[in-house]
Amino acid sequence: MKLRSYQQAAVDAVYDHLRNRDDNPVAVLPTGAGKSLVLAKIASDAVGQWNGRVLILAHVKELLEQNADKVRRLCPDIKVGLYSAGLKKRDTNTPVLVAGIQSIYKRACDLDPFDLIVVDEAHLISKKGDGMYRQFLADCKVINPHVRVIGLTATPFRLDSGMICSPEHFLNQVCYEIGIKELIRDGYLSPLISKAGVNRADFGGLHLRAGEFVSEEVESLVNDDALVSAACGEIVELTADRRAVLIFASSVAHGRRVVEVLRENHGIECGFVTGETPAGERDELLARFRGDAPTSLIETEPLRFLCNVNVLTTGFDAPRVDCVVMLRPTMSPGLLYQCVGRGFRLHPGKENCLVLDFGGNIERHGPIDQIKPKDKAKRPDQCPPAKECEKCHALVACGYANCPECGHPFPPPEREAHDAEASEAGVLSGEVTDTEYDVQDIIYRVHRKRDADEDAPRCLRVDYMIGLERWQSEFICIEHSGYARRKAEAWWSERCLDPCPSNADEAVDIAGSGLLAATETLSVRSISGQKYDRIIKQTLGDIPNAALEEAPF
């Protein structure tokens, strides 16, 4: 087995770190990039070239089997052992031992010392002084104070504590990192695409518990019969040309309802896997979904749809997955990455992987290739205690929609997106999406930049309502000069027979009198990774004629 150039670069970076520093490195490679081959190469070199002893740790049996298989294939002369209760293996004295952390974390003293410990999915190591990994690694350090730890992960951060590398942690520095877009560009990962959807659920009222949405509230919201039926109909429509559709549901009850609706309304068989699914049934469903050859004389059809609840996020390898459906919201950027990552792998005939996000997750966390833990200093739902009216400058509580002093409407709230839909948000940074919306309402107001001087030029702010609690804004530089003023004049002449005013208050008064042509539709361009969308096209109604409006009939 020959390593790809980036895999060899990761191995070289780990070796360079171990030679030149006394602490422990982390190599960051995306899901589907072949971390198993990297750790297999490190393990085989440690045994074959340096006569060391290596432990490879993981947390699910699929990863244990993958990692052991890669080491055996890369270096068949090295004896590889397995220690896992789930796999019914209890090897202890092989040069390379692949072990499940749940089975081994209390048994460090039962094993001979290790020179090198490689942790797959290393973001699972808690930065605090507890947890199975922390306990086991601390015990190994007592047995051999010179043991070195290497971490491999696709997501070098945790929801509860941020980046996993720090001076006081078992893992200290990222020594190598390669991004998703680079590997897609070079043909090593499948391209990702998204499509716009129409079905929404409002997640704005959900509460958080331990950093994640409260599961009971999520289930109550997403398990609505009408919403499930609408979402399933949209999934069927958008996946007509897809061969393997992997669905992530929010709960067991929600997943069962999805499976039921797909069967009854659309005649589609959808497998269903949870943590309680018997091992034999689970293995059969996964084999059918992967398209594996049948192991019995009974012929079974390949399974095109598979729904799961918190199971197939890590260690599940099905390269033919060409659609990932997020039917649940999450506040965890790492979980979102792991779910979408099931579609990264290449497969013959697979052109790309479609991501349908009904949970508003990509809008919440950003493009997959730019996901980072959020600053915990400010809660995402935190708003200032008061706001200033732009017209009369009164300070009022932030809950008011209109100023209680003068009646002036406040701008629509700039909320973090929690709307559930198969959204048009780009999965990768730089992805351009143009979407047309019907305009349901328009609000005109005066806008002055925050912290601007009192005599600074102001704008006409126009807010277009293009959906439930969804607004798109543009700013017309009425009081500016030069190019900005010429653009404002052009914008005004398309909508009004009167000359463009030079005062923003006058512009608002004219607009409020109904003398501007109404915008009927907007085309909005979203570039994933950029904070603001922009309007690229508008369809206008007729320009009102002031003389006709005032004429008596």
Image (spheres, helix red, strand yellow):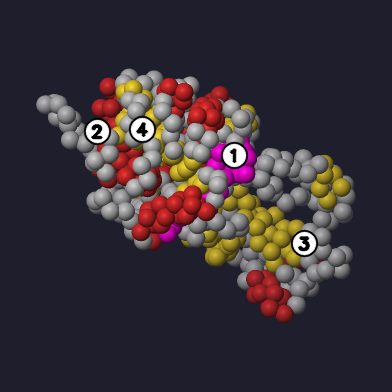
Does the image show residue 474? yes
Label 3 belongs to which residue? Answer: 449
Q: Amino acid at mark 3?
A: Lys
Label 1 belongs to which residue? Answer: 169
Q: What span is in magenta?
A: 156-183
Residue farthest to the left?
A: 297
Secondary structure beneath disc 3? Answer: loop
Secondary structure beneath disc 4? Answer: strand
Q: Position of residue 231 (x, y in %)?
A: 43, 37
Label 4 belongs to which residue? Answer: 97
In the picture, residue 166 is in which quadrant? top right
Q: Which mark is residue 288?
A: 2
* Residue 20, placed above or below residue 129: below
Q: Position of residue 360 (x, y in %)?
A: 53, 43
Residue farthest to the front?
A: 51
Q: Gap between marks 4 and 2, in whole Å?
A: 31 Å
Q: Nearer the viewer, mark 1 or mark 2?
A: 1
Q: Does the magenta segment cover residue 389?
A: no
Pick the residue in front: 90 or 473.
Answer: 90
Q: Position of residue 123 (x, y in %)?
A: 51, 39
Q: Badges 4 and 1: C-beta atoms under 8 Å apart?
A: no
In the picture, residue 295 is in which quadrant? top left
Earlier residue among tags 3 and 4: 4
Pick the residue in front: 60 or 100.
Answer: 100
Q: Gap between marks 1 and 2, in whole Å?
A: 42 Å
Q: Is residue 379 left or right of residue 158?
A: right
Q: Position of residue 416 (x, y in %)?
A: 63, 45
Q: Gap between marks 4 and 1, in whole Å?
A: 24 Å
Within 10 Å of the Cα at label 3, are there few (<14), some (14-19), or many (20+) other Cα atoms?
few
Earlier residue among tags 2 and 3: 2
Q: Amino acid at mark 2?
A: Arg
